[in-house]
């Protein structure tokens, strides 16, 4: 007696569902468990000038590389300042960005103008810079800090 395999409709539906879900499961595993450096590496953020007069714009240099595209990132940069002996967090700047090409700027400065709140009186500050990778199944954040930035009134009042 010959035994013939005859797939049932339920078996065919199950097989098709598995074929459709496997790529999603694979993408979920990568998004969830692969290190952030698979997509982006953020090495440093530093001020172009570490001493500024009150009212002057703050320009920063970022050092990062985009390793795999396309990706969506969110940047949040804010100053934490010591003003009259108290540590104060000033209003940060937020902006989303999308990248469709890889690049490597780990050795060269990507200069940008800080759009968040600056101190209105003499202060010593540092920047916290957070970069968040936004993926369909995960969000990953890396936070780095800059060196000190002194804001003076030009009269020697840097603290």
Image: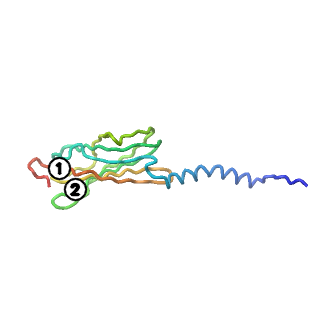
Q: Quadrant of residue 8?
A: bottom right
Residue 133 on image: x %, y %: 43, 50
The tag on residue 81 is 2
Residue 13 on image: x %, y %: 71, 52
Locate the N terminus and report the quarter of the image it occupies. Answer: bottom right
Nearer-the-camera pick, 35 or 7? 35
Can you name the residue that lies furthest to the bottom here?
86
SS class of the residue under badge 1?
strand
Mark 1 lies on residue: 151
Locate the C terminus and report the quarter of the image it occupies. Answer: bottom left
SS class of the residue under badge 2?
strand
Q: CA distance from mark 1 to mark 2?
A: 10 Å
Residue 87 on image: x %, y %: 22, 60
Q: Residue placed at 29% from the left, 40% from the top? A: 111
Contact? badges 1 and 2 (CB < 8 Å): yes
When the figure is inspected, residue 140 is found, relative to residue 56, above or below; the finding is: below
Q: Residues within 10 Å of mark 1 (few under 14, many from 20)?
A: many
Q: Residues within 10 Å of mark 2 (few under 14, many from 20)?
A: many
The tag on residue 117 is none
Relative to 99, 144 lies left or right: left
Q: Residue placed at 25% from the left, 56% from the top? A: 80
Can you name the residue that lies furthest to the left here?
155
User: Of marks 1 and 2, which one's residue comes earlier in the chain?
Assistant: 2
């Amino acid at each position: 007696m010959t035994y013939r395999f005859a797939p049932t409709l339920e078996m065919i539906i199950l097989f098709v569902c598995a074929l459709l879900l496997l790529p999603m499961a694979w993408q979920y595993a990568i998004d969830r468990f692969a290190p952030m450096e698979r997509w982006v590496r953020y090495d440093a953020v530093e001020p172009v000038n570490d001493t500024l007069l009150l009212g002057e714009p703050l320009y920063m240099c970022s050092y990062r590389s985009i390793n795999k595209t396309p990706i969506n990132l969110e940047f949040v940069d804010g100053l934490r300042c010591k003003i009259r002996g108290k540590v104060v967090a000033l209003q940060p700047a937020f902006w989303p960005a999308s990248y469709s090409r890889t690049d490597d700027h780990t050795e060269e400065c990507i200069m940008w103008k800080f759009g968040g709140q600056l101190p209105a009186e003499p202060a010593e500050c540092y920047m916290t810079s957070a970069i968040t990778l936004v993926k369909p199944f995960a969000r990953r954040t890396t936070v780095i800090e800059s060196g000190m930035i002194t804001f003076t009134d030009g009269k020697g009042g840097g603290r």
